[in-house]
Structure formats: structure tokens, C-alpha cells
Image (spheres, rainbow, N blue to C red):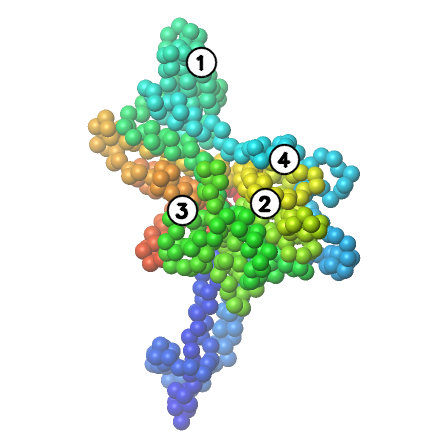
Amino acid sequence: MEREKRNDMSYSRKRSFTLGAYGSVDRFTCGDETGPESAQDKSLDNLDSPASERKPFRSSSSNQRESELFEIIEKLQGSRIDEQRCEFPLPLKSPLLTTGRELPLILPSKLGGYWIDPPLDRLVDVSPTSSHYGVDPESYDIMERDGEAKIYHEFFRSRYHHSFTAVDPTLGPLVLSVCLEEEENRLRVILRMKECSLHGVFSVSLFPTMPSAVELAKMLCDRVTVSKFDVVCYLKAPELITTFDEHRVSPNFKFGVLCQKNRQLTEEDILGNNEESEEFKEFLSILGETVQLQGFTGFRGGLDVCHGQTGSEAVYTSFRGREIMFHVATKLPYTEGDPQQLQRKRHIGNDIVALVCQEGQTPFLSDVIKSHFLHCFIVVRRIQRQEGTGGAAYQVSVTAREDVPPFGPVLPDPPVFTDHSKFREFLLAKLINAEISCYKAEQFSRLEVRTRSSLLENLQAELFTRSQCMMGDQSLIAVPTSEGLRGPSEGSGGFIENFKRAIRVRSHSFENLGVPRKNSSSTSQKAKTEKDGDSDKSSGPLPAPTDSLVAAELKDQTSPQEEI
């Protein structure tokens, strides 16, 4: 009878997924549905256990172990959720929402660390974005992220030139390019180092004889200590060098778009909005056009265009030769029962700049969205114009972390736009300049140095190896074209993708060159991750990278003092 009772009890197997860094966990819970898999698992458990242990269905020790296991799992999942959770400061809740007067678009964080434009203190005359003047759309200049990135492409590739490589004991890998401009009787030189690239032009008349590569390198940087450079004779070297120089230059941008309704003060409330009002749709139409993701061929910004896993629609536009994809929260998948809405957070939380469209008078708190990467928010509130003027106007305010430098175009005074075409020009230029300016913040500047260092190591090693192979050195095996040095036509995932690609490529290049790795355990784990990632590509799109995953990549590559 006892065996029959056990057989009558059903146990359904449920799988709970966590979209954070902890993967998925199988849970076995009691239910009313019986499946063949659960019945088979139950019978196998009964056969494997001794007779003395099969009498009670569950012993107290097994129940205790199971409860401890689930307690650990909940802690792991909870830490991921708590990391992204933000509670609105209690003193701000009731007084502000009952005051009845017009509220500002943005309020400062309780912990500080952000600047706001226009400043809340009306006595402050200097705006944080007043470094660019003018309200005419023709003055809405777009910043250059790397003004010297295209020098090699413009001045070297069309002329006969030479490139050299070396590994300096203190500076690390060096890649030098020298071009003789006979018409002007001068030498143009570029020295690429881990920190930066140095560019100089020297008159040939300064030298009694043609200077060596070492002399030219020391003229640009007196810290160079190498005694010789190796000549690069690989035929496709210009392509690899151009790709390295321009790895920071991308014509593609992605921005988050959030809708904040009245009395919404927390991240959960804002990310949980699922309906789009007519006012919000009008605002999206100003940003760009709504496109179907299925089969979309433009810049997708990490969205799935094949399997529909990131929604069916998105907002896209092109602006002054640049492609922009907007991660609109209400168009990303909504997950029932998930207050954090991690399906949406994993895209918007990995953007650097986000737009917030307010419906109502509730202000936006600078740090309400928890993310390692979001450094700037541009907040827009739709306001009614005076009777007889027609249409709606938009009020704009900007907040960014305190280490983000000023960027233009400057907000007009008052910061209100009535012309939608001028508003669009201003907003898109402001978004692009905001992202470029955010890259100069401390967190991203350290990431960029790490990315550049990895790519330069790979470039120097590949140029040297391929040159030796062309000269007939059979002891070295030519390495394939590196993933991290792909050309723009093969796709560019932006700054974060370049960083992750550089880390993967450095491991790949070391293995091909026979250089011993410092940490064998991390190497094997990273290789396994790469292999798993490659196999996933055949079965469907990879999920968008979360900020915790990239932070984990960074932590693995930095010393404790450098961790972010």
C-alpha cells in the first residue's frame, strides 16, 4: 500500500530561469501533474536507494539539505536582483507629490555624484553643458570620439610607407608607421602605444641622413628604450592597422528609451510600463520610425532580428550618416511575475545614455536605474502650449555622473522646444555627444585602455608572425585573421563588444603564438566559454550582454586595485 501511495503522488519538474549571471536551476516541487520524465526519475531514485532508506519517502536530513540548497539559490538570485534594485528616498515621496506646484524634471541623488542641467539652483549662472553655444540647428555639432583615428587611412594608405613593430621592456608592444611625403619634403610618423597613438610631422631637412625607426620613435616618445624594430612585410598589414586605429570610430549608436508615468518613483515601476499612450507614440515618432525587427537589415543594436526574442518592433533612425537604434522599454519583452523586468533591463542597463519621457509631474531621480554603464539621462516632459499656439512643446533636462565632461549642444533658456524638427535635431545630437562624452568618464576610460592594450598586443603579434612567415620562417605558424581586428563591414558591436572581443582575441593569439599563459585555470574556463558561445550561435541569437557579465570580464583581467 505504501508503494502504491508513493506511485500515486506526482512530482512535476519545473525549471526557473534567472537572466543574471547565475544561469538556471532545476527545482522539483510537488504538483498535480504527472509527466513521464518525473515518473522515470522517481523510479530510478527508488531503485538506486537501499531498502532501509526507501521506507520513508523523505527523511528529515534530505528535507534539510534540500531547504539549504534552495536557500543558497535564493540568495544567489536575490543578490542579482538587489544589485539592480533602487528604493526612492522616503523624505521625497509624500511632500513632492502633494505640493501642487510645478516640479523639476530631475532631482539629485540622495548620495550625490551627478550634475543636472539646467541647475536646480537658479542662482547658478554656469550651465554644465555651456561649452557649446548657439540654438540654431546648424550649430548642433557632433563631437569626434577620436579625432586622429583616420590619419593613417587618409595620409598613409594612399602613399608608399613602411611599418615596424617592437616590444619595449617598459612600454610593451609598439607599432610604428613612417611615410615620406616627397611633395612637402617631410616625414609623417605614427607611434602606437598602449595608452595612445602619437602623431608627428618632421621636415626631412632636420636630418643629415634618413633617420632610423628607433630615432623617429624616440622623437615622438622619449620613454622608448628598444634598440631595434622589426620590419612589417605582410601584404595585408594596412588593413589590420587601419582597423586597429579606427576601432573606436563607429557610425552606430544605441540608446535606451524609458516612459515614466505619474507617481512612478522606482526602477520597477518605470520598467514595468507596458502600454504606450498617444503622447508617448508621438514622442517616438519624433525620434525615428517604428520598424519590424524580423528581417531588419540595418544596425540592430543587439536586438534579435531572426527569432523575435527581443520583441517584434523597435524605433530606428539615421542621422548625419549615423545609424541609431532605440531600446524602447515598452517594445521589449514583458515578463509576468518579474518585478525587475530583466528582459528589458539587460538591454537598457547596458546602454550608456538613456532617454526618459515623462507623462505627468513626477520628477526623475538621477540614480534610480541601477547600472554599471548608464552614465547619462536626458529627460523630456511634454507640456501644453498656450491656447491658440497649437501643438505641444517639450521641456528638456539633462543629468550625468559627475566625472562626465560637459557636452553640447547647449540647452536654450528656457529649455523648451516648440518646433518638432528642431527638437529632433537637438535631441539626436545631444544623445550622440552624451555617449562620446561619457567615454571620458573614469570607468570607461580605464575600460578603453584595457581594450586598446589587448588589441595592440594582438596587432603587434600578428604583424610580426605573418611577416616572419612571408620571409620563409617555417617555425612560426600563421595565425588566422583575428576576430578583434575585423573591418567595419563585418560588423561593429560598439565599445562594450570591442572590449569583450579584445579579451577573447588576446587569449586566442597567445595560444597560436605559443606564448605561455599566466593563469591556466582562467584560460581553460575562458576557452570553454568561447566554445559554448560558438555552439550557441547555431541554435539561436545570444542574449544581450549584461553589465555584470562585462564587469566579470573586467575583473578577470585586472588587478584588485583596478577593479571597477
Would you identify the image quadrant in which residue 92 lies? bottom right
Label 2 sits on what residue type? His
Is residue 255 found left or right of 238 in the rendered image? right
Separation of marks 4 and 3 at Cα, in angstroms: 31 Å
What residue is shown at x 75% (from left), y 37% (from top)? 124
Count residues near mark 4 (Cα–Cα under 10 Å), then give few for <14, some for 14-19, many for 20+: some
- Please tell me how crowded label 3 is: few (under 14), some (14-19), or many (20+) other residues with Cα within 10 Å: some
The tag earlier along the polypeptide, 1 or 2, is 1
Residue sitting nearer the eye, 422 or 361: 422
| Kind of residue at disc 3 | Gly
Residue that mark 3 sits on: 298
Instruction: Judge from the rendering whether residue 402 lies leftward or rightward of residue 483; answer left or right.
Output: right
What mark, if any, has residue 202 been given in the picture? 1
Position in image of residue 342 (x %, y %): 52, 59
Q: Marks 4 and 2: which is nearer the front? A: 2
Q: Earlier in the sequence, mark 2 or mark 3?
A: 3
How far from the left and from the top, in percent, is residue 261? Answer: 63, 59
Mark in the foreground, 2 or 3: 2
Residue at the spot of label 4: 135
Q: Residue furthest front?
A: 388
In space, the residues marked 1 and 4 are separated at their CA atoms by 41 Å
What secondary structure is found at the residue carrying circle 4? loop
- For marks 1 and 4, the one nearer the N-term is 4
Who comes first in sequence, dot 4 or dot 3? 4
User: Residue 420: which numbered mark, if any?
Assistant: 2
Say which amino acid is labelled 1: Phe
- Tell me the SS state at disc 3: loop
Residue pictured at 45% horizontal, 83% vertical: 32
Q: CA distance from mark 1 to mark 2?
A: 50 Å
Left or right placement of residue 414 versus residue 36 in this view: right
